[in-house]
């Protein structure tokens, strides 16, 4: 999950991967040690929600990749490292965008 409207750079709020192909959803409040999670732009594993400055709405993109790799990527990858590992292995991709403003 990332925020392309962050003031300086695209801000990554969540990196989660190695999810089972038959997973139908994620429970609310996924802890940082559940599933395989990477480092967000805060430098931490797990989800850190949106907190944009007051003003215009920010877009939040949730991108899902289907890969032809076994679910064995190591924990702690940041978004750049994950996308590098996924390069050439993407079978399908989908993005859902939501907005939030304070």
Image (tube, rainbow, N blue to C red):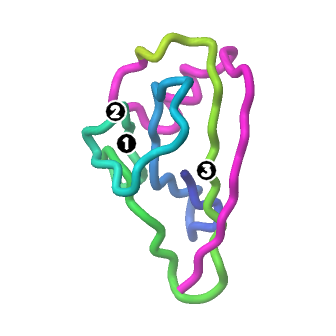
The residue to which callout 2 is attached is 76
**Residue at the spot x=46%, y=45% of the render?**
26
Residue drawn at 41 percent across, 49 percent down: 27
Residue 94 inside the magenta-drawn segment: yes
> Foreground residue, 98 or 58?
98
Say which element carries label 1. loop
Is 46 in front, or is 40? Answer: 46
Q: Mark 3 points at which residue?
A: 62
Where residue 5 sits: x, y (%)? 64, 67
Q: Could you tell me if the residues under marks 3 and 1 are in contact, i.e. CB atoms within 8 Å? A: no
> Count the marks: how many?
3
Query: Of the numbered discs in the image, which one, if any, rests on residue 39?
Result: 1
Q: Where is residue 10 in the image (x, y as percent from the top left)?
A: 58, 56
- The structure residue drawn at horizontal position 35% and vertical position 33%, both measured from the top left corner, is 35
Q: Above or below — where is 92 with respect to 58?
A: above
The numbered mark, 3 or 1, whose residue comes first in the sequence reads 1
Residue 26 among magenta residues: no
Task: Give the label, 3 or 1, closer to the camera.
Answer: 3
Q: In this view, does 41 lie to the left or right of 83?
A: left
Q: What stretch is highlighted in magenta?
A: 73-102
Rounded to the nearest whole Å, what is the CA distance between mark 3 and mark 1?
A: 15 Å
| Marks 1 & 2, CB-CB < 8 Å contact | yes
- Contact, CB < 8 Å: mark 3 with mark 2? no
**Along the viewing direction, whichever of 17 and 3 lies nearer the viewer:** 17
On screen, residue 23 above or below 11: above
């Amino acid at each position: 999950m990332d925020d392309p409207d962050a003031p300086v750079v695209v801000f990554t709020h969540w990196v989660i991967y190695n999810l089972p192909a038959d997973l139908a959803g994620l429970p609310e409040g996924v802890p940082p040690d559940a599933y395989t999670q990477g480092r967000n732009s805060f430098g931490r594993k797990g989800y850190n929600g949106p907190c944009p400055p007051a003003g215009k709405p920010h877009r939040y993109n949730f991108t899902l990749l289907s890969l032809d790799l076994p679910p064995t990527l190591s924990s702690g990858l940041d978004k750049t490292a994950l996308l590098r590992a996924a390069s050439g292995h993407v079978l399908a991709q989908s993005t859902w965008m939501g907005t939030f403003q304070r």
